[in-house]
Image (tube, rainbow, N blue to C red):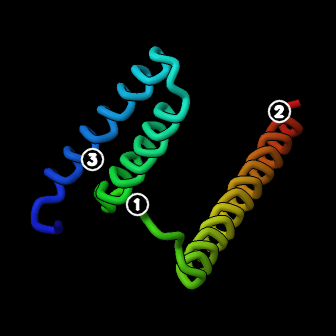
Amino acid sequence: MTSRPGLWRALAALFTLINLVGIGWAIAESEGPHAAVHVALSLLGMYGMWRLSPRAGRQDAPTAELAELRLEQLQQSVDAIALEVERIGEAQRFNAKLQAEQGARQD
């Protein structure tokens, strides 16, 4: 079963599709129990397709250590930005003070 997962996925999809058609057919013939069997088999086929689907795209939740590391890096980045914003504010205050002094001298 592990040697050709693509083939098994295709067979599970075909099995599901056939049973979905069977649901419609059984409903059209007014056969309730027959339709219920096809519903159960369709669900079984969908479960099989899900189990056989590739797991590469699925990721586990990050571990607590990784989350803690990311949080620490984020805190350092926020601290660095706060420091730069404070420096910009000081430079603007100094510039405003110089402009005010120059304006007072010209008057």
Q: Secondary structure at mark 2?
A: helix
Residue 93, x across and y down, in percent: 80, 51
Q: Which mark is residue 2?
A: none
Q: Nearer the viewer, mark 1 or mark 2?
A: 1
Tell me if mark 3 has few (under 14), some (14-19) or many (20+) residues whose alpha carbon lies within 10 angstroms of its own: many
Q: Secondary structure at mark 3?
A: helix
The residue carrying mark 2 is: 106
Q: Secondary structure at mark 1?
A: loop
Instruction: Determine contact: label 1, label 2, CB under 8 Å.
Output: no
| Closest to the observer, 5 or 69 | 5
| Closest to the observer, 72 or 41 | 41
Q: Which numbered disc, 1 or 3, marks the residue that appears first in the sequence?
A: 3
| 74 over 101 or under it: above or below | below
Q: Which of the 4 image quadrants contains residue 5?
A: bottom left
The residue carrying mark 3 is: 12
Left or right: residue 88 versus residue 26 is right
Residue 29, x across and y down, in percent: 45, 16
| 46 over 71 or under it: above or below | above
Q: Amino acid at mark 3?
A: Ala
| Closest to the observer, 11 or 39 | 39
The residue carrying mark 1 is: 58
Residue extending farthest to the top is: 28
Tell me if mark 1 has few (under 14), some (14-19) or many (20+) residues whose alpha carbon lies within 10 angstroms of its own: few
> Which of the image's four quarters has the N terminus?
bottom left
As measured in the structure, the alpha-carbon distance from the residue carrying label 1 to the one carrying label 2 is 70 Å
Q: Amino acid at mark 2?
A: Gln
Residue extending farthest to the bottom is: 65
Q: Amino acid at mark 1?
A: Arg
Instruction: Determine contact: label 1, label 3, CB under 8 Å.
Output: no
